[in-house]
Image: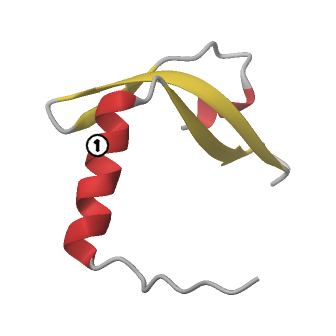
Amino acid sequence: MKIDTPPRDPRRRRQDVLRRLDEEIDIWVASADADGLPCLVPLWFVWHDASAWLATRTTNPTDTI
């Protein structure tokens, strides 16, 4: 596999991230439990006023976030 496209500049990366935050409804969140075991889960989120709002149950592995 050959990648011919050059890396995005910081301005373009920021634009791409902000666009995805405005359009997406799921975000993947990585955390670890008390023993250090990793956990990766999709969560619904809202991007509002430059902040990401997430909610989860205390029984969810991501409750430590």
Residue 22 point in image, percent of width and height: 29, 32
Q: How is the protein colored in the picture?
A: secondary structure
Q: Residue at x 43, y 29 (%)?
A: 24
Residue 32 point in image, percent of width and height: 73, 48
Q: Is 33 left or right of 17, judged from the image as shown?
A: right
Task: Tell me if residue 52 comes above or below residue 1 in the rendering.
Answer: above
For mark 1, give the secondary structure. helix
The C terminus lies in quadrant? top right
Task: Tell me if residue 53 comes above or below residue 28 in the rendering.
Answer: above
Q: Is 39 left or right of 17, judged from the image as shown?
A: right
Nearest the eye: 20 or 50: 20
Q: Residue at x 63, y 12 (%)?
A: 57
> Image quarter for residue 10?
bottom left
Check disc 1 and report the residue beneath it: 19
Q: Is 21 left or right of 44, judged from the image as shown?
A: left
Task: Tell me if residue 26 comes above or below residue 10 in the rendering.
Answer: above
The N terminus lies in quadrant? bottom right
Residue 23 point in image, percent of width and height: 35, 30
Q: Residue at x 28, y 43 (%)?
A: 19
Q: Amino acid at mark 1?
A: Arg
Residue 25 point in image, percent of width and height: 46, 23
> Image quarter for residue 3?
bottom right
